């Protein structure tokens, strides 16, 4: 047997001996598409109440506040709006929820934040700066600041939010992309852990054209394209379903699990499931590597160990001391994805292709107490309903009250006039009604009374205060005018208390963003190459471009946090004041001040300083050049050699310095 080209070391010098238990023989298992489809449908159907509650919260947020269904005593079911109109009332509303949501969004936008990556090994912090710059680039080209605002709005309305992180070609470039997934298309298993660590199934409903399905699941495969065309043979070129209004949520509100919204679309069901499988945990004593392989790889590992033992025997190493690959059987949990048709056909499947080893979704359910979701909007719906009810009742009372009713005795009607003539003359400008009153008879009079005071105004004022107390968004944080004489310290304290009431929501949403950004960061580490990093990070990384390799960034472990952005006014003011103090004390130069600070004119001033520095460098180089002697003509036939005109482009000080030796010789 031919010896291998590496040296076999004695195992005793690597690790102590140990008796290994025998590995039991097991077999892997697989799940058919129809079984997974049934599990996905069960998860979809289990959160139907959540979807209906979300639609109700959305309707109340955007003004559709009389749409709840009520059952009348006669058994009829109708909406509250229909019932009020049958009673002759106008369903009025005063949308306070929308203003509360907009105020919370304004608080979020007023504090701009950004992701910061910190290397666990402080010696690699310059790589962390590169990753931070790369994350900022991902924020910019995905428009995440705008997307996060709309996602927070969804979080306030439904108590949930979902993002999907992937890598692919879109909008003319290959990059990392982040998409906000409508909750109407998402399904997941029931969970109790508020951190969502007990998620074992999550998926999404896609409606795609047949061409997109073929391009996604059968690229360059004619036989696969024919198979997909047979699976979706009922897809038509024309939409024959109900045509929903364009700018409404009806299309998403009426989604079904198996049927697409339109007949010209193909329903594709994406399912990610945490599955268990038997694996071998391997420890290569020769190289010191730890890894895992499928149980089917056991024969290959045994063959490698046999070859090592044979080589060791030739080198005189005992078999017990050979550094072999040790294996240990265990059950591994892996995220497995499947793209299914409504009939259970598997269009694509496999293990998670991402380095983070999980599904591509980042989501948050608030507060998930005992597995329940309760949103910010849900807490104030009852107050909004009572406010609308009081406004409608006050309007009805005012409409049914007497306002300028004329009481004209019948026996006082003048001769030659009818009651219609009296009504016309009574309401006419400068009208005159001539009649002869009868002794002792009642004179005509006009009645105008105020609305009956039943305490509706006091109740309305109470509900307005309760709305602020329950939501936590008080008048101070809304920027409303305060009564005169209110101390500024009290006003600032009220703003602080209001911000404290919203702190739990903001921190929960911040956790969602950190988990999402961590997946973005790991996806960037997986798919970006070295040149891509440097092109994004720019020249402010602190090291030479040639010193970076893909392995440096990809193999570095980073901690990602969400911190206040340097673009915020408060941060810029503090940093600029600190840098100005260092500059005034002489600890930093002007160039360092402009490069580090956040001044609006910094780039222009730095460019000007660099131009002046280049001019000074050119002048110094010309001044250091030796003088060229003047060549005299040799004969009359030859042309004289012209003396270089270096003095004409030099400053006067340099010219005088070069002429000084000649003047001394003349003296």
Image (tube, rainbow, N blue to C red):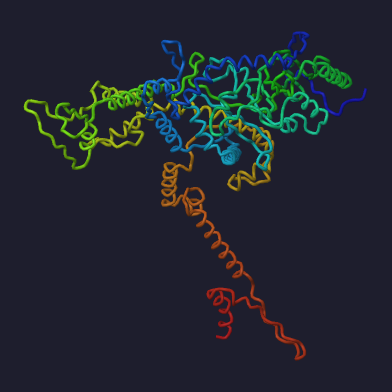
Question: Seen in the image, is 455 located left or right of residue 522?
Answer: left
Tell me where residue 17 appears, x and y as whole percent.
74, 13
Which of the pair 424/109 is nearer the observer?
A: 424
Residue 345 location (% of width, % of height): 74, 20
Q: Which residue is nearer to you in this view: 246 or 438?
A: 438
Relative to 579, is 662 above or below? below
**Residue 288 visible in the shown view:** no
In the rendered image, which quarter contains the N terminus?
A: top right
The answer to whether residue 657 of the structure is visible from this angle is yes
* Quarter location, residue 518: top right
Image quadrant where residue 663 sits: bottom right
Which residue: 14% across, 37% down? 434
Identify the residue at horizontal 51%, vertical 57% (top origin).
604
Q: Is residue 353 left or right of residue 501?
A: right
- Residue 135 in percent (x, y) is at 58, 38
Q: Where is residue 457 in the image (x, y as percent from the top left)?
A: 27, 25
């Amino acid at each position: 047997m031919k010896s291998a080209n590496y040296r076999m070391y004695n195992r005793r010098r690597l690790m102590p001996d140990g008796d290994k238990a025998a590995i039991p023989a097991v077999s892997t298992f697989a799940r058919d598409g129809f079984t997974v489809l049934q599990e996905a449908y069960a998860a979809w159907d289990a959160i139907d109440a959540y979807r209906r509650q979300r639609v109700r919260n959305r309707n109340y947020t955007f003004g559709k506040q009389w749409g709840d269904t009520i059952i009348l005593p006669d058994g009829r079911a109708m909406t509250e709006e229909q019932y009020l109109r049958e009673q002759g009332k106008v369903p009025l509303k005063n949308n306070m929820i929308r203003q509360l949501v907009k105020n919370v969004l304004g608080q979020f936008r007023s504090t701009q934040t950004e992701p910061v990556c910190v290397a666990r090994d402080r010696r690699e912090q310059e790589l962390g700066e590169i990753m931070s710059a790369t994350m900022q680039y991902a924020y910019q080209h995905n428009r995440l600041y705008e997307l996060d605002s709309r996602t927070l709005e969804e979080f306030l309305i439904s108590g949930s939010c979902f993002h999907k992180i992937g890598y692919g070609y879109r909008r003319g470039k290959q990059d990392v992309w982040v998409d906000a997934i409508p909750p109407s298309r998402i399904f997941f298993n029931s969970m109790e852990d508020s951190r969502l660590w007990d998620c074992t199934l999550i998926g999404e409903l896609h409606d795609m054209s047949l061409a997109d399905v073929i391009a996604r699941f059968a690229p360059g495969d004619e036989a696969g394209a024919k198979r997909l065309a047979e699976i979706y043979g009922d897809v038509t070129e024309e939409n024959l379903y109900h045509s929903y209004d364009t700018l409404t949520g009806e299309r998403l509100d009426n989604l079904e699990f198996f049927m697409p919204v339109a007949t010209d679309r193909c329903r594709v069901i994406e399912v990610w499931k945490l599955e268990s499988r038997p694996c071998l945990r391997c420890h290569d004593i020769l190289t010191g590597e730890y890894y895992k392989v499928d149980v089917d790889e056991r024969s290959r590992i045994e063959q490698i160990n046999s070859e090592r033992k044979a080589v060791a025997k030739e080198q005189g190493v005992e078999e017990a001391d050979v550094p072999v690959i040790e294996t240990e059987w265990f059950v591994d949990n892996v995220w497995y994805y499947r793209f299914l048709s409504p009939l259970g056909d598997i269009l694509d499947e496999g293990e998670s292709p991402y380095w983070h080893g999980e599904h591509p979704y980042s989501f948050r359910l608030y507060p998930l107490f005992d597995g329940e979701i309760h949103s910010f909007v849900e807490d104030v719906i009852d107050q909004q309903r009572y406010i609308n009810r009081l406004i409608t009742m006050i309007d009805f009372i005012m409409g049914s009250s007497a306002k300028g009713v004329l009481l004209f005795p019948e026996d006082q009607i003048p001769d030659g006039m009818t009651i219609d003539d009296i009504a016309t003359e009574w309401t006419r400008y400068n009208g005159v009604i001539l009649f002869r009153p009868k002794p002792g008879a009642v004179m005509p009079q006009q009645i105008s009374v105020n609305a009956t005071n039943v305490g509706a105004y006091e109740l309305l004022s109470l509900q307005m205060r309760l709305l602020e107390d329950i939501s936590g968004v008080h008048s101070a944080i809304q920027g409303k005018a305060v009564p005169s004489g209110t101390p500024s310290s009290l006003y600032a304290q009220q703003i602080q208390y209001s911000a404290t009431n919203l702190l739990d929501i903001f921190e929960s949403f911040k956790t969602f963003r950190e988990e999402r950004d961590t997946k973005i960061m790991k996806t960037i580490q997986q798919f970006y190459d070295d040149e891509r990093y440097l092109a994004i990070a720019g020249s402010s990384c602190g090291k030479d471009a040639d010193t970076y390799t893909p392995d440096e960034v990809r193999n570095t472990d980073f901690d990602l946090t969400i911190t206040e952005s340097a673009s915020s006014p408060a941060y810029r003011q503090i940093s600029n004041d600190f840098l100005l103090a260092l500059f005034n004390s002489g600890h930093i130069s002007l160039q360092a001040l402009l490069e580090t600070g956040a001044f609006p004119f910094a780039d222009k001033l730095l460019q000007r300083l660099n131009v002046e520095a280049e001019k000074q460098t050119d002048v110094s180089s010309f001044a250091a050049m030796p003088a060229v002697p003047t060549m005299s003509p040799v004969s009359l036939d030859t042309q004289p050699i012209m003396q270089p005109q270096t003095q004409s482009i030099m400053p006067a000080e340099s010219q005088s310095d070069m002429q000084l030796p000649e003047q001394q010789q003349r003296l």
